[in-house]
Image (cartoon, helix red, strand yellow):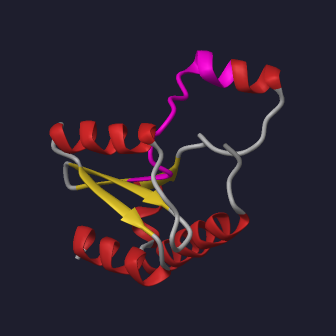
């Protein structure tokens, strides 16, 4: 499923803010390249390398806790795979979030890292 430009812009702004606010945690937050348009060869290679449908857009690992952040444009809906992934991660002890605004992202991060 192709990434919506609005969702991509939101994620980019959030990551930029994180990097400016928490430069010492630069490597603790990373994006998962599950979305976007790819040619069939690249898509097949990524699948063989372990790309999984539904995995959250951003992952933050801090003080022994994995935080899975699914980015959505305002009003965006989770797919069945995304719901399944978030439920599975919750069962495993991860913190899971649906983020549809810059302000929500800031709240998530501030609560996660203090």
Find out whether residue 58 is within the magenta segment: yes
**In the image, is 84 to the left or to the right of 79?**
left
- Occupied quadrant, residue 22: bottom left
Coordinates of residue 61 in the picture (x, y in percent): 32, 52
For the C terminus, the image quarter is bottom left
> Can you name the residue that lies furthest to the top here?
48
Coordinates of residue 26 in the picture (x, y in percent): 47, 61
Which residue sits at x=44%, y=37%? 81
Q: In this picture, is 52 found above or below 93?
A: above
Which residue sits at x=81%, y=20%? 41
Q: Nearer the viewer, residue 53 or 76?
A: 76
Q: Nearer the viewer, residue 68 or 99?
A: 99
**In the image, is 92 to the left or to the right of 11?**
left
> Can you name the residue that lies furthest to the bottom here?
103
Which residue sits at x=52%, y=64%? 76
Q: Nearer the viewer, residue 19 or 98?
A: 98
Which residue sits at x=67%, y=70%? 6
- Magenta segment boundaries in residue numbering: 45-59
Q: In this picture, is 49 found above or below 20?
A: above
Find out whether residue 102 is within the magenta segment: no
For the N terminus, the image quarter is top right
Coordinates of residue 14 in the picture (x, y in percent): 53, 73
Total number of numbered labels?
A: 0
**In the image, is 16 to the left or to the right of 30?**
right
Coordinates of residue 5 in the picture (x, y in percent): 72, 65
Q: In this picture, is 90 found above or below 8?
A: above
């Amino acid at each position: 499923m192709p990434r919506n430009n609005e969702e991509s812009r939101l994620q980019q702004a959030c990551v930029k803010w994180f990097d400016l606010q928490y430069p010492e945690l630069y490597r603790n937050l990373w994006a998962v390249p599950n979305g976007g348009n790819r040619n069939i060869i690249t898509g097949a290679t990524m699948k063989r390398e372990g790309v999984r449908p539904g995995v959250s857009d951003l992952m933050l690992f801090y003080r022994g806790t994995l935080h899975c952040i699914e980015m959505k444009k305002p009003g965006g809906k989770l797919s069945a795979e995304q719901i399944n992934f978030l439920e599975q991660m919750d069962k495993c002890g991860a913190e899971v979030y649906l983020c549809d605004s810059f302000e929500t992202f800031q709240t998530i991060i501030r609560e996660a890292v203090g």
